[in-house]
Amino acid sequence: MHIQRVINSKSEYRNLQIMRQDAKAIFRAGLEAVDPVSAVRRCVSVDHGQLIVGDKIVDLSHVNNIFVVGAGKASGAMAAALEEILADRITNGLVVVKYGHAVDLSHISLVEAGHPLPDKKGQEGAERILKLAGKACKNDLVICLMSGGGSALLPSPGPGLILADKQDTIQALLSCGASIHEINTIRKHISRIKGGRLALAVHPAGMISLILSDVVGDDLDVIASGPTVPDPSTFQDCMEILSKYRIADKLPKAINKHLAGGAEGKIKETPKPGHRAFANTNHFIIGNNFQALSSARLFAESLGYNTVMLTSLLTGETKDAAHFHAAIIREITQSGHPASPPACLISGGETTVTLKGNGKGGRNQEFALASAIALENVGPMVYLSAGSDGTDGPTDAAGAIMDSTTLTRAKTKGLEATDYLSDNDSYHFFQELGDLYITGPTRTNVMDIRIALVGVKR
């Protein structure tokens, strides 16, 4: 069966506006499920002198000092929640957040720093955290708050390296299409704090990590480059990544020398599983993409959409992912599978963009633009793709929203969608149409949320 196109232009406009508002509401429902303050409150409590974190109980009468450290876009909000619970039991603390993500704190200091490219403020914050961690003794407890963005916000260059080396390296990795797992493998091996080295600094004190996951599969060693967990990756893995993307000649000489030296055994590896530094560490994931998508699905169903949650594990090239999703949407319009209209498709995860043009944008804006091209003449439908943190790539937009009129409206303005896509310039394309999705900082971060609405509710 085919969805009958709405003939009356005013009626079609009205229906699309309703669907656009529905898509935004579904997105917000997903965010509410991973609000960092609520997530910490669900996981942490104090009862009769005992700190309860998940299934772990700590007798606070045996704890001399509680230090709080952390980094990530959500770490400020997480710290605020922890202050509500522990109050003046906190001895000292410091978290590093992205510019614009600050919150008011009473017992924990806060530093704003650069993301996705690290800056001097982040380096200063990382050094202060390492110094604070070094003060922890056997009967102390360190609570570490980690969320997406922590890797860029904790730059502490390894021996013989400087901040500029890390900045150039991250820029090359972000541009070549490397996955976050690959990017963070290299980050861990050019850092003094990542890849389990923060746990080394804290040992022998006890450590509890509260983690808001922004990586596919919730791999602890990848989230914020795993500063508190064992690192299974190696220097040799780093060398293979450089070879895979042919980027060695784009990296600073100091970085190439450092990684090659590590692969030859001249530089000490990151601490591996079984290391004594992890004997008294505990880790709790308090929010992830699956939770956000599940909440979004329930809300979409409450609005009357036949909803399918496709996956929270989507990776790969953004344009390829958009084409795959477009095929599913076309199937809905032709056969009513995997859901009959009015349908809602929800997916998450994190795709990558291999930069070939000189434009501006992010993976969500590029996903929306590629979808608009792939779904020409399919409708009525609306597609919203946005980052849960409120930031898509190096832009002020969380993502973009397109509908079945996007290409028509673009052509009336003289915009050729394929040209903008080829130049990786999705930001300016949607800016011209007024279809950037700008939320401001959400103070959470669990990767991306994509919502497609297909067919008109009756």
Image: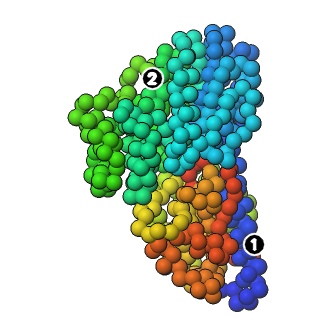
Question: What's the amino acid at mark 1?
Answer: Ile
* Cβ atoms at labels 2 and 1 below 8 Å apart: no
**Horizontal and vertical percent for residue 436?**
65, 67
Q: Residues within 10 Å of mark 1 (few under 14, many from 20)?
A: some
Q: Is residue 71 above or below residue 340?
A: above
Residue at coordinates 55% horizontally, 57% vertically from top-left?
394
Nearer to us in this view, 125 or 184: 125
Q: How is the image coloured?
A: rainbow
**Residue located farthest toward the bottom when viewing the structure as drawn:** 7
Give the secondary structure at mark 2: helix
Give the secondary structure at mark 1: helix
**Residue located farthest toward the left when viewing the structure as drawn:** 264
Question: What's the amino acid at mark 2?
Answer: Leu
**Horizontal and vertical percent for residue 287?**
61, 42
Residue at coordinates 53% horizontally, 40% vertically from top-left?
120
Which quarter shows the N terminus?
bottom right
376 with respect to 14 (left or right): left
Nearer to us in this view, 20 or 56: 20
Q: Residues within 10 Å of mark 2 (few under 14, many from 20)?
A: many
Q: Please report whichever mark, 2 or 1, sits nearer to the chain's N-terminal start.
A: 1
Residue that carries the numbered disc 1 in the rendered image: 18
Write down the quadrant of residue 81 in the picture.
Answer: top right
Work out how far the residue at label 2 is from the one at label 1, CA to CA, in angstroms: 53 Å
Q: Nearer the viewer, mark 2 or mark 1?
A: 2
**Horizontal and vertical percent for residue 272?**
36, 28
12 with respect to 236 (left or right): right
190 with respect to 346 (left or right): left
Label disc, if present, on residue 272 of the rendered structure: none
Nearer to us in this view, 203 or 26: 203
Residue that carries the numbered disc 2 in the rendered image: 200
Q: Is residue 344 visible?
A: no
**Horizontal and vertical percent for residue 248?**
30, 51
